[in-house]
Amino acid sequence: MARPKLSTQYKIFVVEDNTLYAQILKKQLVDDGFNVKVFHNGRDFIASLDEKPDVVTLDYTLPDMTGYDVLQKIQKRMPGTNVIIISAQENINTSIDLMKNGAYDYIMKAPDTREKLSNIIKNIREKDQLKSENIILKDAVKEKYNFRNLIKGNSREIDHIFDLMDKAVQTQISVSISGATGTGKELVAKGIHYNSKRKNKPFVAVNVSAIPDTLIESELFGHEKGAFTGADAKKIGKFELANGGTLFLDEIADLELNLQAKLLRVLQERELTRLGGTDIIPLDVRIITATHKNLGTLISEGKFRKDLYYRLLGLPIELPPLRERGNDIILLAKHFVDEFCRENEMERKEITEEAKKMLLTYHFPGNIRELKAVMELACVLSNRNVIKANHLNMNIDNNVQNLLATEKTMDEYTNEIIHHFLNKYNQNVRLVASKLGIGKSTIYRMLQNKN
């Protein structure tokens, strides 16, 4: 990545009453590529401070005031300005005092002063360059992980999720995210982390279900060399890597019972010991967990510890399936189309009304992940700048099977059917009530209970 420019040209003010010496310093700094302005007294220099120099080289002994007096005025008018004191006298106490009061460095007038000054200013500029880059990167991360940039949607369901995420950001409470596969659980976790006080610390994600049972303990807690066969070197675990930041444990329901007990102890004690080790490692880690399974059911079946469940529960966030998010489906579809066309240097494509209606009536068992795949394929299949219904590769005939794939109560099935038709007919309650042969009050009651 190319480095951003700090300014059109780095500006140096040389404050030196010796005219010849001032010109020597100026020539050196101009040759280094800096924009240099010379002052021969403190009064003229102070009057020009509004020009905001990047660095000031300051002669300690000036005709109208001391370098210490000038330094104080700089600190008052432009705190944080890099000031290099140049003196003809070597006085350790004076240099220490000046450094304590805000001077960046103190150097003696000597044959090698020009070279020393040049190196110091180059180091200062490098430091400022890195600081500028860091600010730009932080701003980019902040913009990227803005809730509405991260999670696309304007539905009431998503507004509720944003409210919960905002509450999570304000505290250090653990967060447990539930929702079907493909609903965006890791995005929510990242959004919380990168908007919290821990945003400058690591975000470490672990998919528990993707790691073999024989390796998960080592992955989480680390191990020492020789801890077991094949442990040829020390390994730092995910908890240590996330220290100070956030550890995201995805598919936590798949963690074995014996490891659930070890995880509970680490969370309670806020410390761990690597496998095969004796050193106690203190931890400061925020835990965010996610699962698509019902932990309450697993607890009743003896497959998940109740005490660990309550330790992890914290602030629960349940992500709605895509089919319940109404016109968010179209908003997301447009986003995925625009993103795919931009990345592949394709002409921007519009979605026809017929295609939109088809999207709104589909069940989307694969949720957002499925929608993304459908829209990317549609971009490839469409010949021009229009995506039509026949470009959408969706198994419409399986909608009923998808609806019945999970055992639910009659009320839950009723709610899904009503939501389906509300999406299809643009939230027209009167029309949906007519189509389904039910009263409007039934629909309003369902919507009220949802909130």
Image (cartoon, rainbow, N blue to C red):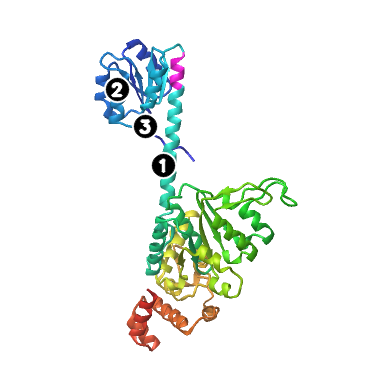
Q: Is residue 372 visible?
A: no
Instruction: Estimate the x, y position of residue 286 in percent, counting from the top left.
Output: 50, 55
Q: Residue at x 29, y 21 (%)?
A: 69
Determine which residue is flagged by label 3. Answer: 8
Q: From the image, which quarter does the C terminus lie in? A: bottom left
Determine which residue is flagged by label 1. Answer: 135
Mark closer to the observer (2, 1): 2
Amino acid at dot 3: Thr
C-beta proximity under 8 Å, tags 2 and 1: no
Looking at the picture, does residue 123 appear above or below residue 363?
A: above
Q: Is residue 63 visible?
A: yes
Residue 23 part of the magenta segment: no
In what element is the residue under mark 2?
helix
| Marking on residue 32 | none
Amino acid at dot 1: Ile
Residue 117 part of the magenta segment: yes
